[in-house]
Image (spheres, helix red, strand yellow):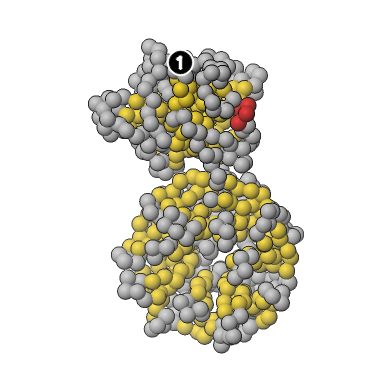
Amino acid sequence: MVGQGTATITVTERLSLIDLTTNSASTTSGNWAGFEHLGSNGSYTDVTANWTVPTASGCTGSFTNTSDWVGIDGANNSNLIQTGTESQCPSGSSTPTYDAWWEILPASETVTSCTIHAGDSMFAEVKKNATNWTITIKDLSTGANCSPANQSYSGQQSSIEWIAEDPSYSGGGLEPLTNYGTVSFLNDTQNGANPQLNYSTDSVDMVQGGTVVSSTSQPNPNTNGFSVAYGSTAPSAPTTSWTNEGNMSNGQSSQQSVLLPDGKVLIAGGQQSSGDSNTKHTQIFTDGTPGSWAAKADMNAARNNFILQPVTISGGGSRVLAAGGVNSSVTNTAELYNESANTWTSTPNMNAARFKHASSILSDGRVLVTGGSNNANETTQFTSTEIYDPVANTWTTKASMNTAREEHLQVTFTDSNGNSKVMVIGGYKYGTGVLKSTEIYDPSTDTWSAGPDMAYTRDWTYNPTNALLLHDGRILVVGGDYTNDSEVYNPSTNTWTTYATPLSAWGGVATLLGSGANYNVLYAGSFDTSNFKKAMLFNPSTNSWSVTYSMNTARGAFTLVTLTSGNVVAAGGQNSTSNEINNTEEYTP
């Protein structure tokens, strides 16, 4: 790859490590750092990666440049098809510039018209088709598709690369290298599979004048990602990863889940793998190396689209409430799980049979249940609400909402005056369709008032956890059925703000990561077939999303729970063929 406005690439021959560097990368190059695989002609047909555009630092008016890309060929021949981004300090300016580009040697690079920023999440792919090649370069932070039309290419296909490069001038010679800090290549694939990166055979350090100027890390634990750092100190390997854990005793999807007081995870109900039928099955996950699952006592009734909440009963005991849902018909039954006794005990019934309802725990420990539907055809939705008191073991009808709704979200929060309130968000109403409206409940007065509309209509069939109370008191909602993007509600201004997501957010699940100032929100999975495995992070301090490592298994409508260790367990769900799965994996931030 060459600098912007220049003509041809110079692929510097890799130098011997002997007497040049004490780093242990398998090879060195005058202008490349990263990973490469070498093979015979025709070996490579597809390469992908995600990365975040690195910031060009130290711009003082002198020209410098760096480029990050994926490509096929160029390591052991003079052909190359590639695409990537540049981080550049322009001559005469202290303001860095960024762009996305693609190139097929011997032609010069083509800089796209996309506006690229430092910190943007990128996806790149070079792929061979039956008669031509697809070059994909997308800015996932802005949604911009910078890709060209399909191209012709006739190179040997004998090498594949994930590279941070010091580009060359058109007349020869390397451009001054930008201080880019660190760039991490994530979710790398080779011919559609894990590339199994090996540091001792595949890594490349950039060496100029006998000095290491860019250093490559070890691969991540999943061997599908790594980092490159400016300078001679090799960065740490990206530690974020998904690790396969023990299988569940039974495949389940659309199940509900709670974190128990002892740090274990209870999942219950939903659909099971035998016949895709609703289930009363429950299981508990115990974290470990690896984690393990144990089947537990069945609920008294099979339930799907129900609510599951931890409660504290009279005397201080911990229980889990399951209420409502559908099996052969919609039910108003409710029951409590006692982990120590491994028993489910029926409680008084709700006042209304309902499924696809929402719930949240009030500040006093009671559970508010709202809306839902009472028929499987979903032609009738409720405005009604009721509260379960776990100490008194009673259900009490409360004031009705202004709008009937199902498949909505619900969050208990603190308003701008310091009062505890509940917000219901979006949902679906027969005859009206998907809703963007919100309502706010005041438990102290048993009254509902209209909240501000979201920017977009949203309903959530599979992911009732996708409204999260952030540590600063705001509320984040993600996705919805057929809806991308996210919005954040600020109680102090009573307004919603939209933040674009880099990936489709339909059918996945969100959870909070961390309790300190540097916490994030993890969103993983999807029913969008191109994003089934993928995951992304929301940073509340910058209100921005970025792509993180993909899960090992494609899944939607699954469990995603943050453990007491700070890791996250993803369990069950449906795969790309809509079959329930029983495997589990754990995310390490």
**Picture quarter with the N terminus:** top left
Q: Judge whether 472 appears above or below 182 on screen.
A: below
Whether residue 312 is visible here, answered yes or no, is yes
Q: In this view, does 123 lie to the left or right of 334?
A: left
Q: Position of residue 534 (x, y in %)?
A: 55, 46
The residue at 57%/59% (across/down) is 565
Q: Mark 1 points at which residue?
A: 10
The residue at 44%/48% (across/down) is 545
Q: Where is residue 69 in the image (x, y as percent from the top left)?
A: 48, 29
Q: Which one is in front, 173 or 490?
A: 173
Q: Identify residue type, mark 1.
A: Thr
Q: Position of residue 523 (x, y in %)?
A: 51, 53
Outermost left residue: 92
Q: Judge whether 217 appears above or below 251 on screen.
A: above
The residue at 62%/69% (across/down) is 262
Label 1: state its secondary structure. loop
Tag count: 1
Q: Judge whether 207 appears above or below 381 on screen.
A: above
The residue at 64%/21% (across/down) is 39
The image quarter containing residue 389 is: bottom right
The image quarter containing residue 353 is: bottom right
Label 1 neighbour load within 10 Å: few <14, some 14-19, many 20+: some
Whether residue 149 is visible here, answered yes or no, is no
Q: In this view, does 242 lie to the left or right of 506?
A: right
Q: Which one is in front, 504 or 11?
A: 11
Q: Position of residue 41 (x, y in %)?
A: 64, 18
Outermost top residue: 171
Q: Judge whether 285 appears above or below 197 on screen.
A: below
